[in-house]
Amino acid sequence: MSLLQCTDVTVRFGGLTALNKLTLTIDRGEVLGLIGPNGSGKTTFFNALTALYPLAMGQIQFDGKGLHGQRPQAIYAAGITRTFQRSRLCLSLSVFDNLMIGNHRALQRDLWFNLLRRRALAGEIEDNIERARALLATFSKRLPDQLFAPAGALGMIDRRRVEVCRALISRPKLLLLDEPSAGMTHEETRELMDDILLARQVDPALAVILIEHEMGVIERITQRCVVLNFGQKLCEGPYAQVAADPAVQQAYLGED
Amino acid sequence: MNRSIFVTALLCIGLFTLIAYGLLIAEEQWHVGAVAIGAIVALAAAAKLGGLAALERAHGDSPGRVQAMLVAATLVLLWRFHGDHFALLMIAKVMLFCVACLGLNVQFGYAGVVNFAGAAFLGIGAYTAAVLMAHTAIPHLLVILIGGAVAAAIGLILTLPMLRTRGHYAALITIAFGILFKTFLEVNDVLGGPQGLKLQGMEVLGFAFNDNIEYGEEGEVSFYLNYALLALLILIIAFAAVRRLERSWVGVYLDAVRIDELSASVFGVNVGRWKVLAFAFGNFLAGVAGAVFAAMTGFIAPADFTLSESLILVSIVILGGVGNPWSIVPAAALIVVLPEKLQVIQEYRILLFSILVVLILRFRPDGLIPRRLRVFGQGGKR
């Protein structure tokens, strides 16, 4: 059975149908590319999947559970995390704090524990510092030294890395990457994609959905692509196949 | 451990004590003005020469020792003024305002929940204490805690509409509540109406707080010393609680809720729960401060808990540095003591504070002592 099964997912904003009966599946360990022209509904799909937008219609089955109509917190608890197209780190907090927001599930939320059980809390903090360091080190040798620097002091690529780490630290089953190459150079994009491939080697069951405009990236790391246009699925298949599809070319380049 | 840092820290604390002493002892208007100007010059010099930075380093190295020094300095100050009703009342009032502002700091500085009804929650604590002390036999220390609990509980009702709104609109709800609260007190005969209520004073284990203690020949300890010591104890506990809260996972979640609600919720943070918790926590502290304040002054009236008093509380937090508990102490001292001492500005204090807050927001938006980055564990040193 596939990890994620979306059936007829529809999102409407007033009279505008941003996503129209999208049906999509992804298996464990698969990397799926989600491509399409601007405004075709890619980010809307992520927002619908993470319960930021309500579904007008449709079902989402994830790991055997129905996720439609749930709250964002429940989506996270089920094991879906994401990054945002425009970086949404808390820039005034340290890198460590940002990672710990991502690790919310594993941490104590009890007020009495946090106020009174100081020794247990200190132990939990030390464990998590080690974990954060180890995770950052798989992405960059220098990054662990920046653990207690404000996230705002990092450069663009390191911020993206921290964002990806924040999404990975809770060991999700499905990672949603919303255009991780936005605002970065070719060289930086290549580095980041290598990092992501590395993260998949650490956890081979991790499934990834990647929104990307850099077709080189899509070609290199995805096994299958879904092309969206005007909120509808245009076609799907391996990159070479969809890139050759005349309907896809028309969607990107327009009619003559 | 570096000794010169500790000596510098000690000198700084000495300077703070001296300034507080000078302000409290000055009687003539021009004396007060001179002390205030001298204090500004001395503090600017201490900052320039790295004294304040050394104090911060010393506190980072061994917080316990620096905190003990600060408490000792306060006790010295209290003993110096042990016979002076007015000075002790001032000190105790500053400390109780600090407790209330620590509460606002958790709400506003951490969770981002603006509260323009701080004085109303102070008032809930005060009126709860007045009613319970007059009509029940509940031990008075417990009454203080109940004052906090009632303030927190009434605040919880207020969170129902607040959670449905954001930003300015949530702030408007608190303003409306503050005004309603004062009007409610004024028209309510059971609670004394505009004339307010009288309190008998606290009694703990048979020890009456409101008796002056005489010693030797003509020596007398003002009864306000009892309240000042109680306020100091409460301030220490509240301070420790707020600092622990900030340096825990809860502190991280509260910051996440304030900075970016949406991304916090995507990572499973229950935004509503933490807002409610911060609001209740803050109101509890305000209620406790209000209860002690009522017992200390022996008389409370609706006029003590107006919107402008709420604004004074907010301006203390903004002036000091939003999110930094330490900054509240000097800001509260400045805002509470100066108008009492400089009667020339008494009438215009709200105007002057507004100008001060606008200037701070314009030129130093993080406040006089900005919040520091939270660093867990060994600070990344290995």
Image: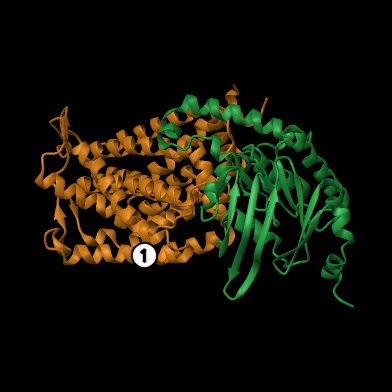
- Which three-letter amino acid code belongs to the residue tagged 1? Ile
Residue B92 in view, yes or no? yes
Q: Position of residue B317 (x, y in %)?
A: 45, 52
Element class at badge 1: helix
Determine which quarter of the picture holds residue A117: top left
Q: Name the residue that disc number 1 marks.
A: B175
Position of the N terminus of chain B, as image quadrant, is top right
In the picture, measured across the screen, residue A87 lies left or right of residue B225, that is: right
**Front one among B282 and B83:** B282
**Front one among B329 and B270:** B270
The green-tinted chain is A
Hue used for the chain lettered B: orange
Determine which quarter of the picture holds residue A130: top right
Q: Position of residue B216 (x, y in %)?
A: 17, 27
Residue B343 in view, yes or no? no
Instruction: Give the residue at the far front of this rendering.
Output: A1
